[in-house]
């Protein structure tokens, strides 16, 4: 965030940015407390996933910015009425330990095999927004659903907390495979960690780190400038420098990413929001939590 603000200020030196940074759950707990006190502090919210943003939109907490410059980006990745805007792609794919696995499986379906599942770890939607979207999407995907998720658990797959624990377990050889957000194993591989990463054949789920302006914002014009910068070529190039996949056409992806077409599997955020408590409950019942 320090680097992001510094780059933003190269374009907008007149805007002073103060921020609070933490995981989505802690950020939202703090914001909900401020809502309850009638004094929300932020002008802008930048969080992991669209499910939380959809809830804030439906509660009237977000200010529409229909004039945002979304040039070169997929309209499907943004709120139709301009209440929030995706800024990057953070996909969830499959990592593996290169010392333990000579020929990794390349499909999500293969994780139902007990020989694979028994050596598989994953983050929990109780702790990770990316995991919430991933398992919520699988639960609603033809050919998968809760029976597939339950089969992985029955085969011995282990659910921890966040993505960091998945990275550690696979990198140290405790597990062969891990379901994880892309940049963690890709960064680790560049530092000689014995891990690989792939996009499974069926496609990947993704969080898009949406940005939004709160309806209670005190500095609306500055907030709009921040949103537009995130979507601009400069903002997208910064995302690439940070190791993320850009949204904007013409901005090349980081060289560490596999040079393959990326198929993002999407489910309506409103549906995932509606099912969010059920997804967490069923996942906890299935894997323990």
Image (cartoon, helix red, strand yellow):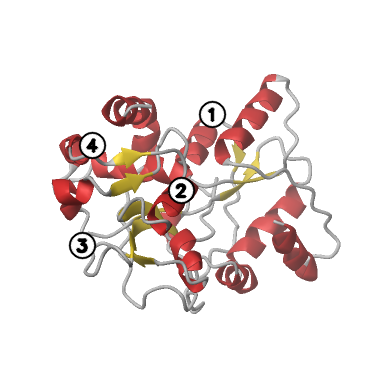
N-terminal of the two: label 3 or label 4? 3
Q: Are marks 1 and 4 in contact (CB under 8 Å)?
A: no
144 lies left or right of 217? left
Q: Which mark is residue 59?
A: 1
Give percent across and percent down for residue 142: 16, 46
Q: Position of residue 218 (x, y in %)?
A: 78, 40
Between discs 2 and 3, the one toward the N terminus:
3
* Residue designated by label 4: 153
Helix, strand or loop at label 3? It is loop
Q: Give the answer, above or below, for where 37 lies relative to 276.
A: above
Residue appearing at x 49%, y 32% in the figure = 58
- Compared to residue 257, the image places residue 14 above or below, namely above
Q: Position of residue 185 (x, y in %)?
A: 44, 62
Identify the image quadrant of the N terminus: bottom right
Describe the element under mark 4 as helix, strand or loop: helix
- For the C terminus, the image quarter is top left
Q: Of marks 1 and 4, which one's residue comes earlier in the chain?
A: 1
Mark 1 or mark 2: whose residue is earlier in sequence = 1
Residue 123 badge: none
Q: Which of these two is toward me, 35 or 252?
A: 252
Q: Which residue is mark 2?
A: 163
Q: Which residue is mark 3?
A: 105
- Foreground pick, 34 / 232: 34
Q: Distance of mark 2 from mark 3, alpha carbons?
A: 20 Å
Between the C-alphas of marks 1 and 4, the distance is: 35 Å
For the view shown, which residue lies furthest in the top direction?
Answer: 36
Badge nearest the viewer, 1 or 2 = 2
Q: Position of residue 26 (x, y in %)?
A: 61, 34
Residue found at x 36% / y 51%: 174
């Amino acid at each position: 965030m320090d680097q992001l603000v510094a780059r933003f200020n190269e374009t907008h030196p007149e805007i002073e940015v103060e921020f609070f940074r933490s995981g989505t759950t802690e950020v939202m707990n703090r914001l909900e407390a401020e809502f309850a006190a009638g004094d929300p502090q932020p002008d802008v919210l930048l969080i992991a996933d669209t499910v939380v943003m959809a809830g804030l939109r439906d509660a009237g907490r977000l200010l529409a910015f229909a004039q945002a410059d979304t040039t070169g980006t997929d309209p499907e990745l943004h709120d139709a009425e301009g209440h929030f805007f995706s800024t990057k792609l953070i996909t969830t794919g499959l990592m593996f330990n290169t010392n333990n696995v000579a020929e990794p499986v390349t499909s999500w379906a293969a994780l139902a095999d007990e020989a694979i599942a028994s050596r598989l770890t994953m983050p929990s939607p109780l702790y990770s927004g990316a995991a919430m979207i991933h398992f919520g999407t699988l639960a609603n995907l033809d050919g998968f659903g809760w029976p597939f998720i339950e089969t992985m658990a029955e085969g011995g797959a282990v659910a921890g907390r966040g993505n960091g624990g998945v990275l550690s377990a696979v990198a140290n050889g405790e597990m062969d495979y891990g379901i994880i957000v892309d940049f963690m194993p890709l960064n680790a591989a560049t530092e000689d960690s014995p891990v690989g990463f792939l996009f499974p054949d069926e496609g990947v789920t993704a969080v898009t780190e949406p940005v939004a302006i709160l309806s209670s914002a005190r500095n609306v014009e500055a907030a709009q400038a921040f949103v537009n910068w995130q979507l601009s070529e400069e903002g997208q190039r910064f995302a690439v420098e940070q190791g993320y996949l850009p949204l904007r056409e013409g901005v090349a992806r980081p060289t560490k990413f596999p040079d393959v077409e990326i198929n993002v599997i999407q489910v309506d955020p409103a549906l995932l929001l509606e099912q969010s408590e059920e997804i967490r409950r069923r996942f906890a019942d299935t894997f323990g939590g």
